[in-house]
Image (cartoon, rainbow, N blue to C red):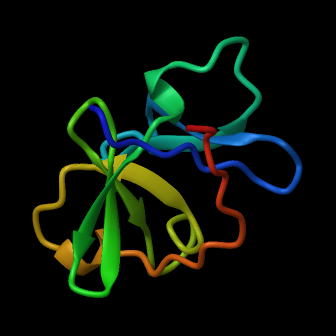
């Protein structure tokens, strides 16, 4: 992936895609905030523009997904291949800091 972003929190942790199951018997893998030892593909997300929204693809071919519904799903984030809920992988992005690389 050439066009990737790293999603970093105010606390210095990155949004990281894991290979751990979110819940037993449920699709979707965990997404955690982490301070990795090295900056690798687990914290890289490929932004894909869809109209005025964006979906974020992992190097594993899965998409960042906001889960809804009752606990334990409510307010959780996973990465998965969407089958039924295509809109759960669409995000509105607010750019608050843009870093320019010297030419």
Q: As rendered, which of 32 and 3 lies closer to the eye?
A: 3
Q: How many marks?
A: 0
Say whether residue 53 is left or right of residue 83: right
Instruction: Residue lying at the far right in this picture: please name it.
Output: 11
Q: Quadrant of residue 15?
A: top right
Say whether residue 28 is left or right of residue 71: left
Instruction: Residue lying at the far bottom in this picture: please name it.
Output: 52
Q: As rendered, which of 35 and 83 lies closer to the eye?
A: 35
Q: Is residue 95 above or below residue 99?
A: below
| Position of residue 59 measured from the top left corner of the image (x, y, whole percent) | 30, 31
Instruction: Residue lying at the far left in this picture: please name it.
Output: 83
Q: Quadrant of the C terminus?
A: top right
Q: Is residue 6 above or below residue 86?
A: above
Q: Quadrant of the N terminus?
A: top left
Say whether residue 35 is left or right of residue 101: right
User: What residue is drawn where x is 70% and y is 72%?
Assistant: 96
Q: As rendered, which of 89 and 98 lies closer to the eye?
A: 98
| Position of residue 49 measured from the top left corner of the image (x, y, whole percent) | 25, 70
Q: As rendered, which of 97 and 61 lies closer to the eye?
A: 97
Say whether residue 41 is left or right of residue 87: right
| Position of residue 41 measured from the top left corner of the image (x, y, whole percent) | 44, 24
Instruction: Residue lying at the far front in this picture: please name it.
Output: 103
User: What residue is drawn where x is 56% and y is 43%?
Assistant: 6
Q: Quadrant of residue 101?
A: top right
Q: Is residue 82 above or below residue 67?
A: above
| Position of residue 32 measured from the top left corner of the image (x, y, whole percent) | 62, 42
User: What residue is drawn where x is 61% and y is 73%?
Assistant: 95
User: What residue is drawn where x is 18% and y is 73%?
Assistant: 86
């Amino acid at each position: 992936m050439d066009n990737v972003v790293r999603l970093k929190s105010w606390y210095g942790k990155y949004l990281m895609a894991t290979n751990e199951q979110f819940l037993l018997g449920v699709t979707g893998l965990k997404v955690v905030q982490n301070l990795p030892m090295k900056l690798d593909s687990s914290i890289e997300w490929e932004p894909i523009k869809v109209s005025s929204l964006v979906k974020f693809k992992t190097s594993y071919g899965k998409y960042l997904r906001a889960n809804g519904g009752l606990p334990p799903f409510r307010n959780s984030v996973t990465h998965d291949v969407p089958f039924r809920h295509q809109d759960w992988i669409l995000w509105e992005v607010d750019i608050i800091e843009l870093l320019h690389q010297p030419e």
